[in-house]
Amino acid sequence: QVQLVESGGDMVQAGGSLRLSCAASGDIFSINTMGWYRQAPGKGNERELVAAISSGGTTNYADSVKGRFTISRDNAKNTVYLQMNNLKPEDTRVYYCNAEVGLIDHWGQGTQVTVSS
């Protein structure tokens, strides 16, 4: 089992920056890819991939955040980060940390990011 705890969500003005953190505990040596997803409020809204990073450091980003967001991973601290710059109102979502262990996805509880115009 893997437990994930996110932090760093806040309310900022457009153009501002935030850094999200996700600390993993438990069976951390089994974690492969870690990533950040986000979800708009409302029933039926899908959780979309924002950025992911493999255990080897390969990264992948959604087109909408390329050049603005950076994902990084500190294996010594079992933590993954999402640096978000030049935030836009459309980035307002609940952000969830994800860890893949084999075919099983583990999720954090989510952290709210709100960007005002």
Image: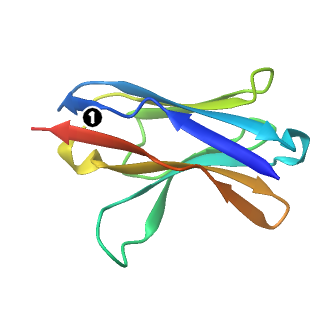
Residue 69 against residue 46 in the figure, above or below: above
Residue 92 against residue 77 in the figure, above or below: below
Viewer-nearest residue: 60 or 78: 78
> Three-letter amino acid code at disc 1?
Leu
Q: Position of residue 81 (x, y in %)?
A: 57, 30
Viewer-nearest residue: 67 or 55: 55
> In the rendered view, does 116 fall on the left or right side of 36?
left
Circle 1 SS class: loop
Q: Position of residue 10 (x, y in %)?
A: 31, 32
* On-image quarter of the C terminus: top left
Q: Which residue corresponds to mark 1?
A: 87
> In the rendered view, does 50 fall on the left or right side of 4?
left
Q: Position of residue 94 (x, y in %)?
A: 38, 51
Viewer-nearest residue: 109 or 36: 109
Q: Residue at x 46, y 62 (%)?
A: 48
Quarter-of-image position of residue 11: top left
In the rendered image, the residue lying farthest to the bottom is 44
In the rendered image, the residue lying farthest to the top is 76
Q: Residue at x 77, y 37 (%)?
A: 25
> In the rendered view, does 67 fall on the left or right side of 11?
right
Q: Residue at x 23, y 50 (%)?
A: 90
Colour mapping: rainbow
